[in-house]
Image (spheres, rainbow, N blue to C red):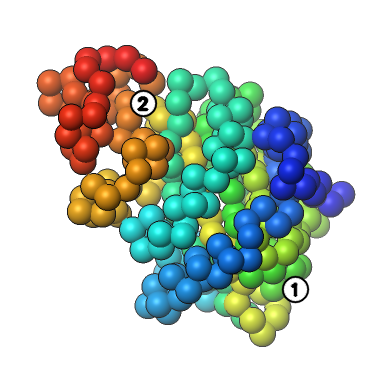
Amino acid sequence: MALAHLSRTDPAEAVAEAVAAEGAVIVDRLAPPELMDRVEEELRPWLAETPAGPDEFSGRLTRRTGALIARSPASRELVMHPLALDTTALVLAHATNFQLHLTQAIAIGPGQGAQPLHRDRWAFDFFPFPNAYEVQCNTIWALTDFTEQNGATRVVPRSNQAEDGVAFEASDTVPAEMERGSALFYSGSVYHGGGANQSDTTRIGVNITYNVAWLRQEENQYISVPKEVAETLPVDLLRVMGYARGAYALGYIDDLRDPIEAVRPGIGSMGFGR
């Protein structure tokens, strides 16, 4: 069973339905080449300085570069892509709102073995969320072509409906093969992992994920993005980064103030509300 592919002109409803049914879907050529060129150029020096992972899970021949909003202005366009936000709003519609969970460029080098299969939602201390309640909607944007040979992300289709702790095998997975600029959309509950890179080139993907706003972010956006940078960003991006209340009352500052007041004084709403 191969992963389904959708067109960049397909609506968010189609993407969200595929994520709910299969756990993952690929949207082909979603970002234009010029945008991916800018992302690549901006991230190149940061990737070069990023050390390889310290263990088998993160990958001893894999570099994981974060803080993309601060380091790559072009990456902000991926974070705020309308299809990504609209799909996330549908996948996480049961929650009051959602926020940015993680930004990370993942460079899998030649010779890297396959990553252990896992669910991204296990980051929340392995809490056993009901399968019907998704807490994440995730994307991986192909900065290079993704092929089975160079370590394309491997997904266990429909495993979003499985129980926690299932010992899936490599034979249960399929590679998310896609062209540069395409995006893999997947849920926090689907079993997946980086593939083994058996090529002589590095496979690079830009992992941008979102979670329900009442859970802690994996990447702390308030520290990853310096205040002097945050003060220059558009309000809608700041809101997605977490400068907004989660659900009814989570995350306010001092005297019930809107958290966006920390970087944009005078534009927050008063008291509680949405």
Coordinates of residue 144 in the picture (x, y in percent): 64, 70
Q: Residue at image x 29%, y 19%? A: 249
Question: In the displayed image of the protein, which residue is found farthest to the right?
Answer: 1
Coordinates of residue 158 in the picture (x, y in percent): 76, 39
| Residue placed most toward the observer, 210 or 119 | 210
- Quarter that holds the C terminus: top left
| Foreground label between 1 and 2 | 2
The three-letter code of the residue at mark 1 reads Gln
- Residue located beneath label 1 in the image: 149
- Residue located beneath label 2 in the image: 246
Mark 2 surroundings: few (<14), some (14-19) or many (≥20) residues within 10 A? many
Coordinates of residue 241 in the picture (x, y in percent): 37, 41
User: Does the image show residue 162?
Assistant: no
Coordinates of residue 129 in the picture (x, y in percent): 54, 28
User: Does the image show residue 231?
Assistant: yes
Q: Residue at image x 70%, y 80%? A: 199
Secondary element at image label 2: loop
Question: In the displayed image of the protein, which residue is found farthest to the bottom?
Answer: 200
| Residue placed most toward the observer, 123 or 74 | 74
User: Is 43 placed left or right of 23 in the picture?
Assistant: left
- Residue 73 figure quarter: bottom left
Where 222 falls versus 152 (above or below)?
above
The three-letter code of the residue at mark 2 reads Gly
| Residue placed most toward the observer, 25 or 169 | 25
